[in-house]
Image: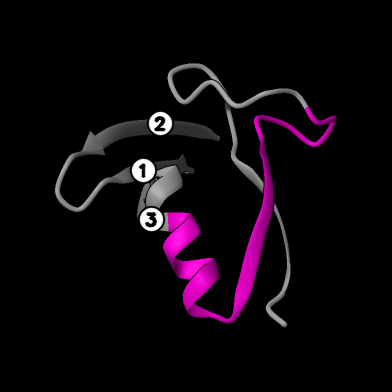
Amino acid sequence: MVIKIDRTLQEQPAQLIETLAVEEAGHVAQHERRQRLYTTTELQAMVKGAGFDVQAIFGDYGGAGLDEARSAKIVLLAEGAA
């Protein structure tokens, strides 16, 4: 089995597009996955719009500071608005 993965970053809207080609026994199946990417500002607005208040933002599950250029994830700590 051979799996080929092609990843592309799209700007508008910001998303990761991943195309997988799986070849096995002479047959090739292709699959596509799209993952929307959000900025910290967009995430905060969505959380607030859902009725929560953002208490803190981290760059990982251990509580490291967020570096938007380098952090692999955004972790938001929020609680229900009073």
Gap in Å between the C-alphas at discs 2 and 3? 32 Å
Q: Nearer the viewer, residue 1 or 45?
A: 45
Earlier residue among tags 2 and 3: 2
Q: Measured along the vertical axis of the image, is residue 81 above or below residue 44? A: below
The relative height of residue 31 versus residue 17 in the rendered view (above or below) is below
Residue 4: image tag: 2
Residue 50: assigned label: none
Query: Magenta part of the protein: which range?
Result: 43-63
Mark 2 / mark 1, whichever is N-terminal: 2
Residue that mark 3 sits on: 42
Q: Residue at x 43, y 41 (%)?
A: 23
Q: Earlier in the sequence, mark 1 or mark 3?
A: 1
Q: Quadrant of the N terminus?
A: top right
Q: Foreground residue, 9 or 44?
A: 44
Name which quarter of the figure residue 61 lies in.
Answer: top right
Q: Tell me how far mark 2 sits from mark 1, CA to CA.
A: 10 Å
The mark closer to the camera, 2 or 3, is: 3
